[in-house]
């Protein structure tokens, strides 16, 4: 496999990214493309559990790829592909279904969360750990970057690999999680975790006016020496000595500090916004086509081995 470890991550097309998404994972994905053999998958079949509108799905996929190209993901360094373009994902998921019990799947966080909320649970939500296991194991993935709260995804993949290997013979590499360190929760404009569901975000590709409106809506505590929510977000953009001096020089002047934050956000996102505008939908299609071809070469060889192991090859 060469010197670089093979890494895979799936990203669901779920709407407009914000700076919390960028510092929480997107930036690390770009950094990792130099140190690892990276496969980044647009997880459109996973998204189908929630998005059941063709026009919306098409738009979400296109925009997700544009976002990643804009932040610096390089198709010459990393394979960027769409899950639905590689049929082996769903084929292997079905094979895994046949060796997986329902009580085991009932331990999944997404299932338990939906059950606790008395939601009607579709089979895709119940079954998603097996599709995710297929996503990971198809590529002999060695590491999967995840947040601390997503470790279970990798555990399911590893358990499934071990069970298949015991049942049919050594076939799959056992993946390990790569916990993304230094990605403290980015607060939103209301002090809670930045999240689209809380409507408290600063958009990553927003116009300067949108960024200004979002920053000026950040909740501040007038009792402290500095506005903590503004300061916590600002630390993502400036070094410790720079930010300490800035907040000392403007102690109590919350408008000046918010203006400084707007300028620092703009320094980061203006070039990315410009780069994003330079890509077309045809560019997106070409990147995904090339990525699918690279992914297919690996998955077709893996599935040939799998089919022989389970005995369906005559």
Image: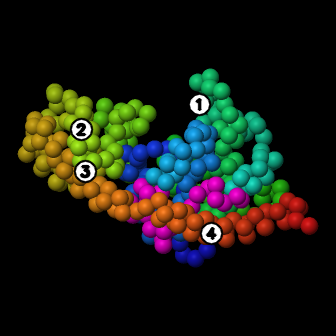
According to the picture, the residue beneath numbered tag 4 turns out to be 293
Q: CA distance from mark 1 to mark 2?
A: 34 Å
Q: Nearer the viewer, mark 4 or mark 1?
A: 4
According to the picture, the residue beneath numbered tag 3 turns out to be 265
- Could you tell which of marks 4 and 2 lies nearer the N-terminus? 2
- Could you tell which of marks 1 and 2 lies nearer the N-terminus? 1
- Could you tell which of marks 3 and 2 lies nearer the N-terminus? 2
Q: Position of residue 181 (x, y in %)?
A: 42, 52
- Could you tell which of marks 4 and 1 lies nearer the N-terminus? 1
Judged from the image, the secondary structure of the residue bearing numbered disc 4 is helix
In the picture, the disc for residue 113 is 1
Q: CA distance from mark 4 to mark 2?
A: 43 Å
Is-magenta flag for residue 83?
yes
Q: Position of residue 63 (x, y in %)?
A: 45, 52
Q: Nearer the viewer, mark 1 or mark 2?
A: 2
According to the picture, the residue beneath numbered tag 2 turns out to be 213
Q: CA distance from mark 3 to mark 4?
A: 37 Å
Q: Vertically, is 68 above or below 305?
A: above
**Residue drawn at point x = 75 percent, y = 55 percent:** 91
For the residue pair 168 and 110, the one nearer the viewer reads as 110
Judged from the image, the secondary structure of the residue bearing numbered disc 2 is helix
Q: CA distance from mark 3 to mark 2?
A: 13 Å
């Amino acid at each position: 496999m060469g010197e670089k470890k093979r890494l895979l991550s799936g990203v669901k097309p779920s709407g407009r990214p914000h700076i919390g998404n960028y510092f929480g994972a997107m930036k690390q994905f770009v950094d990792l493309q130099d140190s690892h053999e990276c496969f980044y998958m647009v997880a459109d079949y996973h998204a189908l559990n929630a998005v059941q509108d063709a026009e919306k799905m098409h738009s979400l996929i296109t925009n997700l790829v544009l976002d990643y190209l804009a932040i610096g993901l390089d198709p010459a360094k990393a394979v960027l592909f769409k899950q639905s373009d590689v049929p082996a994902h769903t084929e292997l998921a079905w094979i895994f279904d046949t060796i997986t019990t329902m009580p085991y799947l009932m331990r999944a966080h997404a299932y338990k969360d939906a059950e606790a909320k008395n939601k009607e649970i579709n089979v895709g939500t119940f079954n998603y750990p097996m599709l995710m296991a297929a996503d990971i194991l198809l590529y002999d993935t060695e590491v999967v970057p995840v947040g601390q709260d997503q470790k279970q995804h990798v555990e399911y993949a590893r358990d499934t690999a071990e069970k298949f290997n015991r049942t049919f013979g050594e076939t799959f590499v056992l993946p390990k999680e790569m916990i993304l360190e230094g990605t403290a929760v980015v607060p939103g404009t209301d002090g809670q975790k930045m999240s689209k569901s809380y409507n408290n975000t600063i958009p990553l590709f927003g116009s300067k006016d949108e960024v200004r409106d979002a920053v000026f809506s950040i909740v501040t505590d007038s009792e402290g020496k500095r506005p903590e929510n503004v300061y916590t977000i600002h630390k993502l953009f400036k070094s410790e000595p720079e930010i300490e001096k800035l907040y000392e020089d403007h102690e109590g002047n919350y408008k000046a500090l918010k203006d400084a934050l707007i300028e620092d956000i703009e320094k980061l996102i203006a070039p990315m916004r410009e780069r994003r505008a330079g890509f077309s939908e045809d560019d997106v299609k070409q990147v995904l086509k090339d990525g699918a071809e690279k992914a297919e070469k690996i998955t077709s060889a893996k599935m040939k081995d799998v089919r022989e192991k389970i005995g369906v090859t005559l």
